[in-house]
Image (cartoon, grey):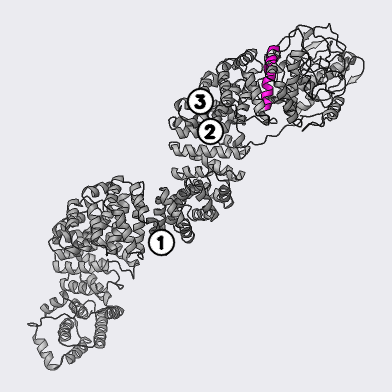
């Protein structure tokens, strides 16, 4: 009977068995008792109900032989098995009976239906329990393992654990090992109907120390091909499951499998399983590449070919440094040969496409080799042949993306063979998100080629991508690749951008980014797409803001602070969007500055962050305040220091410094303190051939020099003048010349360096003026610079006149009459040039300036600012040359009353010394360079002013009669002398004794209620006027003059009211933000701060030692006669703007400068 048991246990169900020699005396007696096999089966089942342990085993063995000898019906078999299971469960401690029961049931495990019934009866549990109870009973283990192997699809408790234990206990028993490994190979396999069990069973095997057991099996039975094959299959299953701690890549098991691959290259299944293990553990040191190459090159099996390609693909994915090994071993030509050989095998075509996609990625050599060998055509053919196979199309799209990336030859193959159409057709008919994802990947790569991009757009590719993004936006990979493709379509093509935005692509991108906030690649490519779509396109930028895209971009920076690519492209997107709320822009600034600090070593982040700072600084002055609080200037300076030789960083950082320093005193000082001037000049010297660096650096110098004597001095001392001139000479771009002139002109505000700057600057300015006479903006900048150099410098005036500045200025006025700012600066330049110089005035007149002035007066009759400047220049010119105004200038000869404030019109010529330069004008609308006082010193000055007023009141109370006499009272040091209401700040400003008054108080001081006793008892009031430059005697009401002016010329455009007391200009003027187009242009008259140290001017320090002669000109018919004594000598006084002059006379009034009520001949 034992021979029969072995045949059944080792054989298959219902197989033909050799019963010869299996008869026993007990079976002979049974045949007598029950003549037919059916009767014997029934009899034995009845005996089992009453059997003992010893008889149960014998009866079960007889039952097995009786079953083999007869043909039982299925119902009889089911009934018998059910009864046997019940008895076995009741008597699990009868090992002999259990092993015969397992053999009987195994004999009838013929089909799935039968197995399902047996499983319901509890057959697997019987087998598992037998393995647990009797692990050392060889025959019981053999029968239980054989039976258990049938139930791989059914619940079997801890059957895998028990089988692993069997391998450990019976490692040397080939029969048991063969049966157990076969069972384990089935149990650990993947079945698509029960996918969840794949990982669970593999993990159970690993936890039961099954890998160690397999190592022992391989060690003992490596020469047994069948056992080795089963073992390789188990290893392939568990390494494919993804179970944790599955197998060490360098474990002894891998060594044995590598040996097995070399031994059994003719065994198809063994090679397949070993290659699959190698695919799952491609970094194993035991992989023999020569063996694999040999196998791949010689095999004729499609299965082995498929697994070889799969192995190569795994290596290319996971061990990128081994791609060169794949190439060097000659596998690439063999792969393409297999693709041609097995054109009808979809699995091989798919695997080859996948391999090609990974081999070509980031390897130009392999890509070129595949392209030359016709790999692209093979991929396209596979797509045509298997147009309905989405898995193949998925791999093919990935291959096309890799093979066309940075490969113009491959791109041309796609153009010539309709590759774009194949990709789009696959996306249109495909349903899987992964196919859409790889299709977008391929399209995004194709769009690097302009011809392929045109094909994408022409064939409706944008719509296909948008549809994929709309339907599969929950797929993070698709969002990433769709955004990438859309970005490439939009890149550098305004027409495509407009079409895409019109179709609604922007909301789709934003929704995709919102759906995957934690996936950095989706966020990065989303930011890239938004940045390209918004590039120079305000409508698209507005769409992004309206769909909350700005917040999404800021959130991307916040969620991925350590990803420098996200930070870079997010900054680029923010740099393109200016229509943003203050709340959002404040949040963006925080992230931008944080990114600059966190990624200080990444030049791209620094570059794009500087661009974003420029944009946000233009959104609102509040953003500049926030940048100051965040120490934004420090971050920009740090970027310039870290990347001195990277042009793009220097270019954008220079621009950022220019915008930070422009019209923001705190940031201006911060940049200066941090060495901004030196860095800007270093950038100009380092990148001499970069026009953008030169341009932006000049902008930065211009912004820093404005109202900043420290920066002005640094620019001069560090050779900035030469750098600017070099830039102007080598880059004759108009904007470069404009900014260069702006820098040089701004340096002229500094009295200590202006004449030294002029020597080099004036020839360059005039050269630009001559070369580009047709450009109004450049002419404006040059005229502005000339006016600044000419002001308060006789040497510069002479230098300008000798260099031929006058004809150029007049020509600019003549050619660009309608450019208001140019005309204003040109008029000022001529005014300063001819000041106290009849020869220069004659030169100006010889240039036919009278005709030009007449045209200006006519053109700007309603523009008060230009009108006044023209009339002012006319008076100066023709009085210097003829003693009277021009007889042909309609407005001036003879006017009812002077059409401009008297203090702007110089008096007649005298033989005695006179101030060498024109005084500054009070009204910032009429003079561009008025300067409000420094804020930090206003309180101190206000206290001094209050003390001065209190002192005046006490003295007036003590001696009211004498108080009105200017000859007896000259005011305290620093006072304005008398009540001329002028802008004089006395010696305190000149000598640093006290600060100027705040803007809010200047109205009263310019034209406040400065009443004076004129000496004859009548009180003369200067209400509401602007006051004299140095204070003076007012002998009639300003209202009379204003009424006369308005009667003659009409109401003054934009003029301020003349109410009593506070007068015009008293309130502080609120700054308004300037657009980017106006940067480094003329400052706004209402916000211009000028050079706050201009109080220390040479002309203000001039000593007047000779007496003035009272001589009314023909144009002064309506002006009151003088009341001073002609023989009175000028004396040093403290009134007026600078060191004004007092004179003795009945007119009183301490201020020596010309007040608004002072006659012109005074």
Label 2 or label 1, whichever comes before in sequence order: 1
SS of the residue under disc 1? helix
Q: Is residue 208 above or below residue 96?
A: above
Q: Is residue 73 above or below residue 430?
A: below
- Badge 2 crowding class, 10 Å Cα cut-off, few under 14, some 14 to 19, many 20 or more, is many
Residue beneath the point at 20% across and 85% down: 51
Q: Is residue 216 visible?
A: yes
Q: Is residue 836 magenta?
A: yes
SS of the residue under disc 2? helix
- The x and y percentages for residue 1009 are 84, 24
Q: Which residue is mark 3?
A: 727
Query: What label does residue 361 carry, if any?
Result: none
Label 3 or label 2, whichever comes before in sequence order: 2
Judge depth for marks 3 and 2 and give the one in front. 3
Q: Which residue is mark 2?
A: 655
- Viewer-side residue, 1038 vs 6: 1038
Label 1 or label 3, whichever comes before in sequence order: 1
- Badge 3 crowding class, 10 Å Cα cut-off, few under 14, some 14 to 19, many 20 or more, is many
- The x and y percentages for residue 164 are 23, 65
CA gap, disc 2 and disc 1: 47 Å
Residue extending farthest right: 1017
CA gap, disc 1 and disc 3: 55 Å
- Viewer-side residue, 429 vs 281: 429
Q: Which residues are magenta?
A: 823-843
- The x and y percentages for residue 148 are 24, 73
Residue extending farthest left: 21
Q: Which residue is mark 1?
A: 425
CA gap, disc 3 and disc 2: 16 Å
Where is the C terminus found, in terms of image quarters? top right
Q: Is residue 586 left or right of residue 33?
A: right
- Badge 1 crowding class, 10 Å Cα cut-off, few under 14, some 14 to 19, many 20 or more, is some
SS of the residue under disc 3? helix
């Amino acid at each position: 009977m034992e021979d029969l048991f072995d045949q059944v246990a080792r054989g298959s169900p219902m197989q033909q068995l050799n019963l010869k020699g299996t008869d026993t005396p007990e079976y002979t007696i049974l045949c007598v008792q029950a003549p037919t096999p059916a009767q014997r089966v029934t009899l034995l089942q009845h005996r089992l109900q009453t059997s003992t342990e010893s008889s149960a085993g014998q009866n079960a063995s007889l039952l097995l032989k009786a079953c083999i000898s007869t043909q039982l019906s299925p119902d009889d078999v089911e009934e018998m098995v059910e009864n046997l299971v019940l008895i076995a469960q009741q008597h699990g401690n009868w090992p002999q009976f259990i092993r015969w029961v397992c053999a009987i049931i195994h004999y009838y495990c013929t089909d799935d239906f039968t197995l399902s019934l047996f499983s319901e009866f509890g057959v697997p549990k019987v087998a598992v329990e037998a393995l647990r109870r009797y692990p050392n009973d060889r025959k019981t283990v053999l029968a239980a393992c054989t039976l258990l192997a049938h139930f791989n699809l059914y619940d079997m408790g801890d059957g895998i654990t028990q089988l692993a234990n069997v391998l450990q206990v019976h490692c040397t028993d080939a029969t048991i090992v063969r049966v157990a490994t076969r069972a384990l190979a089935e149990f650990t396999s993947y079945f698509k109907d029960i996918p969840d069990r794949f990982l669970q069973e593999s993990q159970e095997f690993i936890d039961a120390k099954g890998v160690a057991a397999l190592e022992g099996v391989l060690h003992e039975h490596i020469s047994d091909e069948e056992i080795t094959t089963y073992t390789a299959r188990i290893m392939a299953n568990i390494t494919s499951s993804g179970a944790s701690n599955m197998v060490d890549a360098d474990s002894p098991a891998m060594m044995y499998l590598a040996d097995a691959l070399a031994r059994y290259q003719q065994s198809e299944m063994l090679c397949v399983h070993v290659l699959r293990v190698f695919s799952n553990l491609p970094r194993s040191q035991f992989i023999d590449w020569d063996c694999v190459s040999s196998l791949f090159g010689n095999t004729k099996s499609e299965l082995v070919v498929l697994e070889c390609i799969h192995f190569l693909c795994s290596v290319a994915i996971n061990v990128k440094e081994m791609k060169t090994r794949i190439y060097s071993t000659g596998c690439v030509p063999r792969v393409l040969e297999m693709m041609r050989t097995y054109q009808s095998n979809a699995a091989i075509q798919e695997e080859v496409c996948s391999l090609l996609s990974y081999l070509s990625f980031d390897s130009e050599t392999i890509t070129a080799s595949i392209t030359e060998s016709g790999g692209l055509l093979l991929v396209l053919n596979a797509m045509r042949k298997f147009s309905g196979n989405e898995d193949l199309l998925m791999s093919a799209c990935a291959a096309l993306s890799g093979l066309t990336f940075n490969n113009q030859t491959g791109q041309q193959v796609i153009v010539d063979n309709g590759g774009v159409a194949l990709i789009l057709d696959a996306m249109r008919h495909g349903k899987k998100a992964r196919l859409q994802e790889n299709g977008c990947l391929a399209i995004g790569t194709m769009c690097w080629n302009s011809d392929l991009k045109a094909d994408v757009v022409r064939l409706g590719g944008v719509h296909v991508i948008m549809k994929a993004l709309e339907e599969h936006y929950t797929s993070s990979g698709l969002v990433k690749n769709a955004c990438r493709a859309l970005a490439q379509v939009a890149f550098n093509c305004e027409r495509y951008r407009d079409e895409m935005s019109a179709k609604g692509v922007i909301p789709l991108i934003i929704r995709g980014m919102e759906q995957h906030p934690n996936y950095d690649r989706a966020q990065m490519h989303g930011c890239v797409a938004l940045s390209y779509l918004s590039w120079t396109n305000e409508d698209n930028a507005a769409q992004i803001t309206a769909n909350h895209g700005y917040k999404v971009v800021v959130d991307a920076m916040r969620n991925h602070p350590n990803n420098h690519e996200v930070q870079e492209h997010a900054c680029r997107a923010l740099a393109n969007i200016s229509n943003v709320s203050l709340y959002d822009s404040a949040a963006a600034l925080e992230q931008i500055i944080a990114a600059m600090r966190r990624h200080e070593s990444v030049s791209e982040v620094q570059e794009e962050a500087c661009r974003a700072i420029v944009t946000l600084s233009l959104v609102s002055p509040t953003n500049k305040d926030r940048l100051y609080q965040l120490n934004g200037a420090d971050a920009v300076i740090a970027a310039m220091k870290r990347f001195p030789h990277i042009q793009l960083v220097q270019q954008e950082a220079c621009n950022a410094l220019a915008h930070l320093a422009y019209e923001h005193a705190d940031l201006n000082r911060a940049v200066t303190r941090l060495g901004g001037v030196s860095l800007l000049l270093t950038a100009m010297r380092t990148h001499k051939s970069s026009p953008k660096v030169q341009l932006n650096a000049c902008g930065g110098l211009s912004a820093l020099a404005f109202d900043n004597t420290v920066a002005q001095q640094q620019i001069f001392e560090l050779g900035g003048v030469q750098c600017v001139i070099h830039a102007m000479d080598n880059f004759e771009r108009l904007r470069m010349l404009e900014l260069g002139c702006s820098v040089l002109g701004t340096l002229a505000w500094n009295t200590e360096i202006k004449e030294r700057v002029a020597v080099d600057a004036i020839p360059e300015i005039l050269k630009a003026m001559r070369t580009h006479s047709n450009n109004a903006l450049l002419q404006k900048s040059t005229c502005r610079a000339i006016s600044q150099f000419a002001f308060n410098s006789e040497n510069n005036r002479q230098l300008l006149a000798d260099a031929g500045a006058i004809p150029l200025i007049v020509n600019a006025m003549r050619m660009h009459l309608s450019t208001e700012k140019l005309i204003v600066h040109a008029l000022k330049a001529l005014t300063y040039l001819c000041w106290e110089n009849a020869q220069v005035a004659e030169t100006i007149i010889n240039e036919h300036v009278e005709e030009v002035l007449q045209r200006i007066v006519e053109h700007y009759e309603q523009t008060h600012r230009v009108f006044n400047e023209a009339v002012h220049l006319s008076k100066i010119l023709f009085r210097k040359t003829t003693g009277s105004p021009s007889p042909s200038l309609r407005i001036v000869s003879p006017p009812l009353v002077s059409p401009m404030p008297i203090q702007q019109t110089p008096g007649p010529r005298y033989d005695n010394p006179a101030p060498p330069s024109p005084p500054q004008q009070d009204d910032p609308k009429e003079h561009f360079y008025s300067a409000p006082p420094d804020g930090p010193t206003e309180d101190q000055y206000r206290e001094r002013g209050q003390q001065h007023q209190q002192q005046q009141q006490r003295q007036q109370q003590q001696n009211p009669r004498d108080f009105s006499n200017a000859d007896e009272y000259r005011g305290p040091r620093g006072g304005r002398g008398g009540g001329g209401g002028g802008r004089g700040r006395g010696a305190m400003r000149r000598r640093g004794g006290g600060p100027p008054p705040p803007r809010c108080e200047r109205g009263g001081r310019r034209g406040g209620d400065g009443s004076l006793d004129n000496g004859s008892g009548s009180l003369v009031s200067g209400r509401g006027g602007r006051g004299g430059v140095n204070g003076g005697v007012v002998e009639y009401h300003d209202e009379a003059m204003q009424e006369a002016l308005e009667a003659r010329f009409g109401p003054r455009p934009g003029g301020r009211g003349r109410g009593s007391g506070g007068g015009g200009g008293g309130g502080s003027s609120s700054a308004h933000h300037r657009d980017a187009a106006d940067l480094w242009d003329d400052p706004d008259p209402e916000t211009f701060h000028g050079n706050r140290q201009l109080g220390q001017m040479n002309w203000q320090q001039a000593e007047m030692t000779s007496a003035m002669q009272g001589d009314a000109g023909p144009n002064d018919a309506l002006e009151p006669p003088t009341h001073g004594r002609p023989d009175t000598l000028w004396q040093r006084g403290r009134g007026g703007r600078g060191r004004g002059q007092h004179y003795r006379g009945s007119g009183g009034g301490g201020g020596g400068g010309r007040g608004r009520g002072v006659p012109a001949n005074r």
